[in-house]
Image (cartoon, helix red, strand yellow):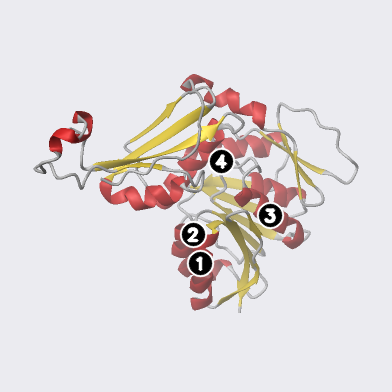
């Protein structure tokens, strides 16, 4: 039995919320990798290697002996000062991007009906880079003349600017968005990156996500931002993306495995002047992504890191 428990004093249920995700046993490794993006302290429940014929069987709890050996679960514990709903939305987006199919997702310590609103208490105006300020739609904000305010209501779609993956790529957007450029956002989530690029002067933006709910949320945010130069539609990565001509700027805030899977398909969307901003890469996997880019004729021009996350700015060699 492989069962690791979270270390530390987690207090009462009201202080911590458990998110427990169950998958088929063969998907356990991929689930663990995704859940570790939320917290490095994991509780893993895998009873597949218990020998029911062992002489010690009578010392094992009956619930363990009777547990389904074909499935496994991973739990993370969210403290009260973090948004459970945002963590849930982040995990949902990552599950879809990596092709994971959870059998069940549970929370303990929070009322499911409160997800959509309870997290708003932890989402405040956030300055990223020199000019961009991400402001929740329900908050007031006194902007300075030079500020570019991006108002967001992410709903249950990933992308509020609070996570390192989003902050890293938005910071690079300030440096690489040129006035009038043609921009592509793969895996748009809430639409935040396309909206930021438009605010920074991009002329034509195309945003895609495999999740229809995310596309709906993104289109609402685009409409509420008063922007008319962003097309947002459903696409499985690049399959349905506009390919009439190369882009000047491409954003892909995904996960390492999905970025690696997408790299062989990138060439028609890029020329020698295109900059691709890849994010959502845990530092342990960054070299794998870099190696794949280099194998397909790309070079890394910048690789900022924040905490355990890495982003890459990439161009053709």
Sequence-first tag of 1 and 4 = 4
Residue 285, given in percent of the width and then of the height, sits at: 49, 62
- Mark earlier in primary sequence (2, 4): 4
- Image quarter of the C terminus: bottom right
Please give the residue where the numbered disc 3 appears in the rendered image.
204
Real-space Cα separation, disc 1 to disc 4, in angstroms = 22 Å
Query: What secondary structure is found at the residue carrying circle 1?
Result: helix
Q: How many marks?
A: 4
Pick the front one: 191 or 180? 191
Identified at 48% across, 71% down, the residue is 292
Label 4 sits on a secondary structure element that is loop
Depth check, mark 3 against mark 4: the one in front is: 4
Q: Is residue 176 visible?
A: yes
Q: Is residue 33 above or below residue 58?
A: below
Disc 1 vs disc 4: which is toward the camera?
A: 1
Give the image quarter of residue 119: top right
* Upstream in sequence: badge 2 or badge 3: 3
Disc 4 designates what residue?
158
Q: Residues within 10 Å of mark 2 (few under 14, many from 20)?
A: many
Q: Which residue is mark 1?
A: 289
Of badges 1 and 3, nearer the viewer stands 1
Please tell me whether residue 274 is drawn above or below residue 204 in the rendered image: below
Residue 302 as seen in the image, left or right of residue 140? left
Res. 277 visible in picture: no
Alpha-carbon neighbours of circle 4 within 10 Å: few (<14), some, or many (≥20)? many
The x and y percentages for residue 25 are: 27, 47
Determine whether label 1 and label 2 are within 8 Å by CB: yes
Locate the N terminus and report the quarter of the image it occupies: top left
């Amino acid at each position: 039995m492989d069962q690791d428990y979270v270390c530390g004093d987690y207090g009462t249920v009201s202080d911590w919320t458990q998110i427990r995700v169950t998958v088929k046993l063969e998907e356990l490794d991929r689930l663990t990798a995704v859940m570790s993006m939320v917290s490095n302290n994991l509780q893993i429940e895998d009873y597949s290697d218990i020998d029911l014929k062992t002489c010690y069987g009578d010392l094992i709890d009956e619930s363990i002996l009777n547990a389904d050996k074909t499935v496994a679960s991973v739990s993370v514990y969210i403290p009260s000062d973090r948004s459970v709903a945002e963590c849930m939305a982040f995990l949902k987006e990552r599950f879809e991007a990596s092709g994971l199919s959870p059998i069940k997702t549970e929370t303990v310590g929070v009322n499911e009906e409160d997800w959509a609103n309870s997290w708003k208490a932890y989402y405040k105006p956030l300055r990223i880079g020199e000019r961009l300020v991400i402001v929740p739609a329900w908050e007031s904000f006194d902007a300075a003349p030079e500020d570019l305010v991006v108002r967001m209501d992410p709903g249950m779609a990933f992308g509020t600017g609070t996570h390192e993956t989003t902050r890293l790529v938005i910071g690079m957007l300030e440096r690489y968005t040129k006035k009038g450029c043609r921009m592509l956002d793969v895996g748009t989530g809430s639409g935040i990156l396309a909206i930021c690029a438009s605010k920074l002067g991009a002329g034509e933006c195309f945003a895609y996500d495999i999740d229809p709910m995310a596309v709906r949320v993104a289109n609402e945010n685009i409409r509420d931002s008063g922007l008319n130069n962003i097309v947002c539609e459903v696409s499985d990565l690049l399959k349905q993306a506009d390919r009439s001509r190369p882009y000047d700027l491409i954003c892909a805030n995904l996960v390492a495995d999905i970025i690696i899977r997408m790299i062989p398909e990138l060439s028609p969307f890029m020329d020698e002047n295109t900059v691709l901003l890849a994010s959502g890469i845990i530092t342990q996997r960054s070299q794998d992504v870099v190696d794949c880019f280099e194998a397909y004729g790309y070079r890394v021009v910048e690789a900022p890191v924040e905490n355990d996350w890495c982003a890459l700015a990439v161009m053709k060699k």
